[in-house]
Image (cartoon, rainbow, N blue to C red):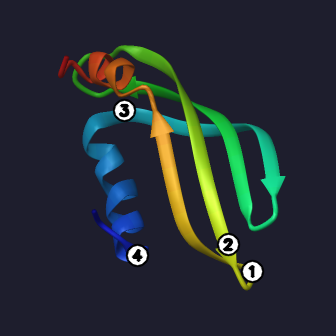
Amino acid sequence: MTEGRDAVKQLFADLANHWESFSIVPDEFIESGDTVVVLSHAEAKGKQTGKEVKLPWVHIWRFSDGKATEVQALTDTALAAEALGTL
């Protein structure tokens, strides 16, 4: 598992290798103590296939002393793989 700021930077840099366009749109924020859950979706277009897709996303943010300590992102990987032509 990759961690830290460098991992986040690399993740965003790699998006351009696979997606012609990619944007995440937050739909709802749910807060409980030091945890924030973001229900969202991504609108993307696969670079090799030209397929457009709307991917559901859930981001779980955990905070301590006002700083993010953990972020988990969940999506439909089969739907993403189909749009990328890897399924």
- Give the residue drawn at x 48%, y 39%: 74
Q: CA distance from mark 1 to mark 4?
A: 17 Å
Task: Identify the image quadrant of residue 41.
Answer: top right
Q: Which residue is mark 3?
A: 20
Task: Report crowding for label 4: few under 14, some 14 to 19, many 20 or more residues within 10 A (C-alpha).
Answer: few
| Residue extending farthest front | 33
Question: CB atoms at circles 2 and 1 under 8 Å apart?
Answer: yes
Q: As displayed, is residue 47 above or below residue 82?
A: below
Q: Which residue is mark 2?
A: 63
> Which of marks 4 and 1 precedes in the sequence?
4
Q: Amino acid at mark 4?
A: Gly
Q: Amino acid at mark 1?
A: Gly
On screen, residue 22 versus residue 67, left or right, reads left
> Which of marks 4 and 2 precedes in the sequence?
4
Q: CA distance from mark 2 to mark 1?
A: 6 Å
> Which of marks 2 and 3 precedes in the sequence?
3
